[in-house]
Image: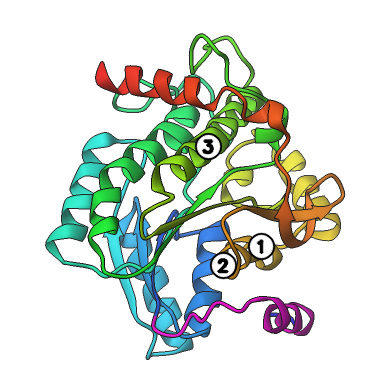
Amino acid sequence: MTNKTNKWFNKNITYSLKNKNILVTGASSGIGLEFSKIALSKGANIIMAIRNLDKGNKIKDELLKINPSYNIKIYKLDISDFNSIEEFVQSIQNDHLDIDVFYNNAGIFRIKNKLTKQGYDLVFGTNYIGTYYLTNIIINYLQSLNHKVDLVLTSSVTGLVFRVRKDKLMDDKCSMMKMYGRSKNALLHYYFYLLDNLSNSNIKVSLVHPGACYTYIIENGYKYKWFKKLAKIFMNVFLNSLEVGSLSCFMALSNESGFYGPSRFIKLKGYPRKMKIINRCIRNYKNTINLTNELLNGK
């Protein structure tokens, strides 16, 4: 970390990462990888859930070159595919993994006219439906652990702008940005649903967003190379670095349940703090959950 970020971290992050077992989805790039690097440097054990095992093992080798004592496990997970999710959870259970933190970080951005293996829009199916399905089938295992577990969901500022429809979850005719924003709004709704249902359990639920960072999902979300180059320069100079963007999860771990993210420049930049969620963004959250269950019951 930079000296500035390290000072902020030491002042604001009170959660002890030493020997904590942290499961991170989407850990092979972007925020997930940056978070994992910082957590490892603070003594955590990282369980990386990723689609490409070859890529994951290369990343593991690179991290072990930094510090051979790092404890890193790699598991295969494609969060857009229910079969992969079920196999992943079964592997976690078979290996009797102890989990202190479950960081739902995996997500994708602008991808048009592509579907998951179960036939859902790929962006909505990955960001929301896959996260919902994974979390729902792993919750019983997390509740069986004899200690507190932090469950962290990842949303976005776009989730405060775009809202899920009342009559159906997905709209094939909406723009790529709106589909992404609705998937993140649905995660806001899911967060409130989990708060209602897990309040008397060993699971503490939090919601985070990293602000605007130039990541792999941005790199793959736009077609033109010149635009990508300009976006990378602009975002790296004026918005959050991956390092700062990854801090939202650490902030959530150090505080009560809540929504944590940057507060500067329309919530796109800066070190994280607890944020308010406008009521209109979440007033129909029970309806969203009902629609989700109806969709999944017909899968």
Query: What residue is pinned by disc 2?
Result: 34
Q: Which mark is residue 187?
A: 3
**Mark 1 or mark 2, which has the lower sequence index?**
2
Is 230 one of the magenta-colored residues?
Answer: no
Q: Residues within 10 Å of mark 1 (few under 14, many from 20)?
A: many
Three-letter code for the amino acid on which mark 1 is drawn: Leu
Residue at 70% x, 34% y: name it. Answer: 160
Q: Is residue 101 above or below residue 86?
A: below
> Residue 112 versus residue 156: which sits nearer the camera?
156
Question: Left of 106 or right of it: where is 158?
Answer: right
The reply to whether discs 1 and 2 touch (Cβ–Cβ < 8 Å) is yes
Estimate the x, y position of residue 283 in percent, counting from the top left: 62, 25
The reply to whether discs 2 and 3 touch (Cβ–Cβ < 8 Å) is no
Label 1 to label 2: alpha-carbon separation: 6 Å
Three-letter code for the amino acid on which mark 3 is drawn: Leu
Identify the element where label 1 is drawn.
Answer: helix
Residue at 48% x, 12% y: name it. Answer: 168
Estimate the x, y position of residue 231 in percent, counting from the top left: 77, 46
Q: Residues within 10 Å of mark 2 (few under 14, many from 20)?
A: many
Identify the element where label 3 is drawn.
Answer: helix
Residue at 59% x, 43% y: name it. Answer: 155
Query: What residue is pinned by disc 1?
Result: 242
Identify the element where label 2 is drawn.
Answer: helix
Q: Is residue 39 above or below residue 271?
A: below
Q: Quadrant of the C terminus?
A: top left
Q: Residues within 10 Å of mark 3 (few under 14, many from 20)?
A: many
User: Which region is colored magenta?
Assistant: 3-19
Residue at 55% x, 13% y: name it. Answer: 166
Three-letter code for the amino acid on which mark 2 is drawn: Glu
